[in-house]
Image: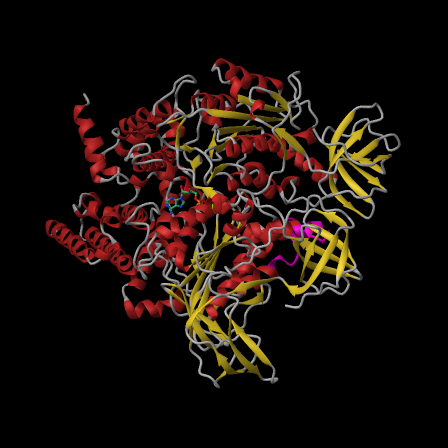
Amino acid sequence: MPPPGGLEYCGLRKVDGPLFVIEGVRDVGFAELVEITAPDGGVRLGQVLEVGRGAALVQVFSGTSGLSNTHTRVRFLGTGLQIPVSTEMLGRVFDGLGRPKDGLPPLLGEELRDVNGLPLNPCLREYPRDFIQTGITAVDLMNSLVRGQKLPIFSGNGLPHNRIAAQIARQARLLRGDLRFAIVFAAMGVKYDVARFFIDSFERSGVIGNVALFLSLADDPSVERLVTPRSALTLAEYLAFEKGMHVLVILTDMTNYCEALREIATARGEIPSRKGYPGYLYSDLASIYERAGRMEGREGSITQMPILTMPSDDISHPVPDLTGFITEGQIVLDRDMHQRGIYPPVAGLPSLSRLMKDGIGKERTRADHPHLAAQLFAAYAKVKDIRALAAVIGEEELSPLDKLYLQFGDAFERRLVTQGEEDDRSITQSLDLGWELLRMLPRGELYRLTEEELKERYDTAAKSEPT
Amino acid sequence: MNPQPDIRGRLVRINGPIVEAEGLGAAGMLDVVEVGALRLIGEVIRLLGDVATIQVYENTGGLKPGDPVFATGRPLSVELGPGLLGSIFDGIQRPLPAIAKHSGLYINRGEKTEPLDRSRAWPFQPVAALGSRLGPGRVFGTVRETPSIEHRLMIPPDWGEVEVLELAPAGDCTLAAVLGRVRDEAGSERELRMSGLWPVRRPRPAAGRLAMTRPLLTGLRVIDALFPLARGGTAAIPGGFGTGKTMTQHALAKWSEADIIVYIGCGERGNEMTEVLREFPEIIDPRTGRSLMERTVLIANTSNMPVAAREVSIYTGITIAEYYRDMGYHVAVMADSTSRWAEALRELSGRLEEMPADEGFPAYLPTRLAEFYERAGAVRTLGGAEASISVIGAVSPPGGDFSEPVTQHTSRFIRCFWALDRDLANARHYPAIGWLGSYSEYLPDIAPWWAERAPEWKPCRDALMDVLQQEVKLQRIAKLVGPDALPDSQRLILFTADLIKNAFLQQNSFDDIDMYCSPEKLTGMMQILELFHRRARELLQRGGTLAAVRELPCLEAVLRMKHAIPNPEAAKLDALRRRVDADFDELDRRVA
Ligand SMILES: Nc1ncnc2c1ncn2[C@@H]1O[C@H](COP(=O)(O)OP(=O)(O)O)[C@@H](O)[C@H]1O
Ligand SMILES: [Mg+2]
């Protein structure tokens, strides 16, 4: 809980959107936390956005409705926004500012921490390399996730991003050693059903006691969304780097977060850059996404899986675009695949895991994994070209080789990508499936694989397989 | 340094990284100030009467109106001296490992650490003679900074000619040591030291500019063969997210034929800096046989670090580069990403309530970009050596759209444009440098260098480029009618273009053999591809078929040559070339 602060002021100069201006204040610090008592006696929190020449500009996390210029009382609390953190928070539900929302008593935190955190020193980072098996072939084989990575899901309205995230949270494990993730879940502006879906899923798999939820739902004030991911990550940093836990942070929906940021920027009359979003959206998002990783000499890790819905499925929209510039890859969901009944509809080409290269291969997954994935990507890219050609000249006119590619492409989507929501495939299963598909193509096409790899896995299996 | 403890102001307004203070009328524009009790570092960027506007290089949370502001009376400067190589600094040259020692995992505010290690002793070697007169930039002594780099200690460029009165004997000295005394033109005596300060925003002078006549070999085939950079030149790598800007910059930092690398991570990921830090010490420079880290300086102002410090980071980096250039070295600077730097400018400008130009960027964006890239070049140093700085800037256009202001303005000031192509990247064709959107204006400058050493380079380049260009046109038709509807002569173009892409242009940075390509291997491979295409074309003219070409036994070896033939064994490509010739001879005989 914030400590009691100094002087109480009464009366505001101006209320505008989520912001107000108060004059005649002294000893107020930039970014200081503010306690606001509305005329009806209700207490809200806010934060100083700008201060000088006796006035302060304050944003109110729970909105300004009901505040009056004359009867609002304001106290400056002398600190930034802090939340208590402790391992006891696992199994509990909080609002965006870290206050209990589950009717249980407030926590005595082991420590109070500023939600904005501090930048992690890059020279103490440990490069993430431990492969996480999610049981989903499209991820494990083609876009592998490693422990400490920030890998978002780029989705669209109505696409099954929540089911995929829940499946990953349920199935994620390390190949060697035991990995149990503690999960920190932050909901920004999503509907209650979405939160309920995740809670049910965590309950069913018996991990709910290991999950901390920070909920700022669609009917909660939008400004609170700006704090929600920071509260969640403050706890995650504590659990990972002080308590040695491996933490999976799910942030949904980052698009709502960005909209709240845009709202404040507009209210302040800032000059927008693209689509009305403020010019500092990149830096702001980075201050969230960079709170992930592994640190030298610390046991724990933070793996981030932000979810965002791309407005009109447009990947060049500022929210997915700037996210993609910061995160370590992206899992892109494809509406067309979804409509063709493919689950999970992970788009083959635009999806990418940047940390895959160091997490797979010999002694990690399997020696053939890097080349196999590269070959599958290359072949699937060719499928896309051939499909485009077939749409123009007709499938009959294609060369026999091109026809083989089309068959490969269908198998890739129907057999390799497609799997059940409860289907938990081992990486070996996924790799073998990849080879099975490549065997549909002539050997000469597979130049991304080495001669030895082909001998071992293409030739032998081709012989043993009934034709 | 001229501290001004007497000039002391008070904060009157705080707006994120921009603050205003009263009582600083006597401070100079662009002077460094220290703000608040934590003495956060800031720089005066506007003076209006008694009020100074200051950009603060650290988070300003908790600062209050009334807090003190201290003037230092000097501009924002970097310390230049031995110990830069192998180090990692933040945007204002604070060494990150030293900060980690004080404050642990997180970077606390108000950290003050000396940029260079004061306790370390360096083996000083005097070179100037007593009584000799040395002009600015002349070397008076050396220090072996790393086994491969000799650090040359110079008379500072702003001193004028001096007479050497005293010089320390050879021996181990720390940065604190006085290495000698000189008398300047005005007759006053000055001390020589191992390190000195230089203002980051002021380019270090050189005696003159030289023509750029040599390629900066990078080890990346698509660059060295198709879009070469000159030593002392400037290049931009624009591309949407995930198209390979950082990987390309890392590859250039590893394999470029430069003496010194300054790598500026400017508003990008922390893990990428970690990767360099962990990887470079392990990689052996093929030219010196020493660890790559010994020639590298890292500036890391990652995306989550304060935005004002991001704005300075590129000046910090380029000033360090100029310092090594002045010693006579060839330096290559990588800045990833200049767009994040431009965004820092935009954010600061917005808080200053300046009138924006395109997309909210300040109107002076192009001027700043030009000033930065102007600091590249091949020069005659004040000391008389030939040296250079090549600058390679990554550009991150929103949505991958090159028509945005940073890409557009940058392209006016650089002469090499390596356009990353989303389709190539999606198809995992790396490096995804597209051959249609990219160009190099250095071709005519550096062609004579190649002509002297490997005369086949230019004709082969032209031949490969020609096939690639023709392919693009033919693909348009092929997309409508299908490739099989084209005559063999045209399908050969499609076929060779594919071969060039797969066997030559694609270069996997993770492959132990292929990650780097020596010039011998490069020209060997170019010759094979040129020969293959020429012979195939001749064969078709004689009535041979493309189907027969596809069946050639040598084809497999051509496709795999990049992985199969390590750089030191590039001579094996001669044998492969003869094999290609022989295979075609055989086909010719069958046709005849
Ligand atoms: N030359 C290359 N060789 C192999 N993989 C590459 C290469 N260039 C890019 N990649 C792949 O693309 C991913 C994104 O590249 P990166 O340079 O980080 O993109 P950007 O900086 O443009 O966002 C890398 O993680 C890697 O998987
Ligand atoms: Mg990058």
Residue B240 can be seen in this image: no
Q: Quadrant of residue A177?
A: top left
The residue range painted magenta reads B348-366
A42 is higher (above) or lower (below) than B71: above
Of B260 and A35, the residue lying toward us: A35
Identify the residue at the far top of this view.
A204
Give the side of residue B452 with respect to residue A129, left or right. left
Q: Is residue B175 left or right of residue A8?
A: left
* Up/down of B180 relative to B344, above or below: below
- Taking depth in this image into account, of B24 and B570 the one nearest to the observer is B24
Q: Does the stretch in magenta take in A467?
A: no
Viewer-closest of A463 and B161: B161
Res A274 visible:
yes
Residue B94 at x, y percent in the picture: 55, 55
Corner quadrant of residue A42: top right
Residue depicted at x 34% and y 45%: B510
Q: Could you say where residue B576 lies in the image, as x and y percent from the top left?
A: 18, 53
Quadrant in the picture for the C terminus of chain A:
top left
Q: How is colour applied across the structure in the image?
A: secondary structure
Give above or below for B200 relative to A94: below
Q: Position of residue A159 (x, y in %)?
A: 51, 24
Q: Could you tell me which quadrant the N terminus of chain A lies in? A: top right
**Is residue A323 positioned above or below B32 on the image?**
above
Where's residue B181, x and y in %? 53, 79
Which residue occupies 43% across, 18% down? Answer: A421
**Would you say residue B351 sits in the magenta stretch?**
yes
**Left or right of B469 in this view: A227:** right
